[in-house]
Image (cartoon, rainbow, N blue to C red):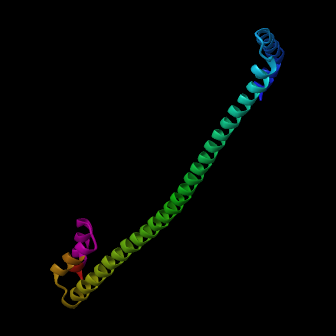
């Protein structure tokens, strides 16, 4: 459109040049109006065609970019869905791992409690000093505490 304004600004120059060419042709005996085309109209037509072609190319490019943008948006949505799925799976696996660790710990504690019960029962039945040391070891009794217990047993 700016080009059209520029061209129309030079219309007088083109008309003047066309008139000169017509007068030259009329001197040679040819009819100027038929021999020399209207430059202004021809140039305007060429400019309009070039602009139309450029606009068509730009519109094609816009359509291609819009399609590409739509494709990228769709891929992004799919990636987000997949990421969310992976995050949920990760959380579930973490929960299962915590539960498994707790179950293992409870099992160890239950086994340990059962072991302590058995040692205690045997010690109380037999009053065997070796069982007292096993009981002390299972309860993580310090050597000082064990010494006090042994002294107490010796008195009693």
Where residue 18 sits, quadrant-wise, is top right
Q: Is 70 drawn above or below residue 93 in the view shown? A: above
Q: Quadrant of the N terminus?
A: top right
The spot of residue 39 in percent (x, y) is: 76, 21
Q: Residue at x 71, y 29 (%)?
A: 46
Residue 144, by quadrant, is bottom left
Instruction: Provide residue 26's location: percent of width, then percent of height.
Output: 80, 12
Residue 141 covered by magenta stretch: yes
Q: Residue 125 sits in which quadrant?
A: bottom left
Image height of 99 relative to 86, above or below: below
The residue nearer to you, when weighing 34 against 52, is: 34
From the top left corner, tell me how far across and down residue 69 is, in percent. Answer: 59, 49
Q: Quadrant of the C terminus?
A: bottom left
* Residue name at image x 28 percent, y 73 percent: 139
Which of the pair 108/76 is nearer the observer? 76
Residue at the front extreme of this rendering = 29
Q: Identify the residue at the far bottom of this view.
A: 125
Left or right, 75 with respect to 35, comes to left
Task: Name the residue: 78% across, 26% down.
Answer: 41
Q: Position of residue 123 (x, y in %)?
A: 21, 85
The chief SS type of the magenta part is helix
Q: Name the residue nearer the viewer: 82 or 21.
A: 21
Residue 140 among those drawn in magenta = yes
Which stretch is magenta?
Answer: 136-152
Nearer-the-camera pick, 77 or 25:
25
From the viewer's perspective, is residue 51 above or below residue 141?
Answer: above
Q: How many numbered marks, from 0 up?
A: 0
């Amino acid at each position: 459109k700016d080009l059209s304004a520029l061209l129309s600004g030079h219309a007088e120059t083109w008309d003047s040049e066309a008139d000169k060419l017509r007068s030259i042709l009329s001197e040679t005996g040819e009819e100027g109006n038929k021999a020399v085309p209207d430059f202004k109209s021809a140039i305007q037509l060429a400019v309009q065609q070039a602009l139309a072609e450029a606009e068509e190319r730009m519109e094609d490019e816009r359509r291609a970019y819009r399609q590409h943008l739509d494709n990228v948006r769709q891929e992004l949505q799919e990636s987000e869905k997949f990421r969310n799925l992976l995050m949920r799976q990760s959380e579930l696996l973490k929960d299962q791992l915590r539960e498994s660790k707790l179950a293992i710990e409870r099992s160890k504690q239950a086994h340990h409690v059962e072991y302590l019960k058995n040692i205690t029962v045997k010690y109380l039945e037999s009053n065997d000093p070796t069982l007292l040391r096993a009981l002390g070891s299972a309860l993580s009794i310090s050597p000082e505490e064990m010494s006090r217990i042994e002294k107490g047993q010796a008195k009693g």
